[in-house]
Amino acid sequence: MLEIETPHGPARAHLHAPAGEPRGALVLGHGAGGGVAAPDLVATTEVATARGLTVALIEQPYRVAGRRSTPAAHLLDEAWIAVLEELRARPLAGLAVVTGGRSSGARVACRTAAAVGAVGVLCLAFPLVAPSGKSRQEELDSVIVPVLVVQGENDRFGVPKRAKGRTVSVIRGDHALKSDRDGLRSAVDNWLAALQPLQSTSSRRARPRTPIPPSKDTPG
């Protein structure tokens, strides 16, 4: 685990290394009131490391500080960008990076995809419609790299539509994405396998990086 300073306090990155040389990296954020041990984040981590990616599960500063109330969007984004800058400078140096997360974390990844140079965005249970009824479609539409959305068919926040460059995999279940673990794994695995920036880097020899010790604990 790495503690990373951000403009809004320390964040934590829980690093999971694949067997052998990594062919890329996946950085994931948690939901608004949850943590990095959410079942869909754990399942995605297992799929990605098996696919040869280093995975970083990020705890935002407010969660590290023990708070559950979510800060304003621009504060989340600023902390996320600071974390990505540090990861790219050290443990993920030289790797193509996919960003993403569940719910609120997916929104952060969409809003910051261009700023952090993501080659793809993975959204787990993207909350399309806010409790106020306002659509968050513009956050998805703003992403210009490939996007995967994995959404429960009964998600109370709605289901995004497919679009050019955006794959939407609708599986059994609701916003928690607990009902169809196999469907989630399959959707993530197939998308990562086909993501061109990862294919193009898989045959290259990775640059030397700071070694990542294997994780001994359950994420979070």
Image (tube, rainbow, N blue to C red):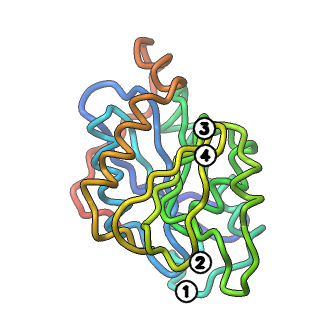
Compare marks 2 and 4 and give the one earlier in the sequence: 2
Q: Which mark is residue 86?
A: 4
Question: Nearer the observer, disc 2 or disc 4?
Answer: 2
Q: Pointer 1 and pointer 2: residues touching (CB < 8 Å)?
A: yes
Q: Which residue is mark 2?
A: 62
Q: How many labels sit on residues?
A: 4
**Badge 1 amino acid:** Arg
Judging from the image, what secondary structure is the residue with disc 2 in?
helix
Query: Circle 3 sits in a helix, a strand or a loop, which is it?
Result: loop
Q: Which mark is residue 54?
A: none
- Please tell me whether residue 140 is drawn above or below residue 167 in the rendered image: below
On residue 146, which mark appears? 3
Name the residue nearer the viewer: 77 or 132.
Answer: 132
Q: Quadrant of residue 144?
A: top right
**Mark 3 surroundings: few (<14), some (14-19) or many (≥20) residues within 10 A:** some
x then y, percent, for residue 140: 69, 54
Q: Say which element carries label 4.
A: helix
Residue picked out by circle 1: 67
Q: Is residue 7 left or right of residue 65?
A: right
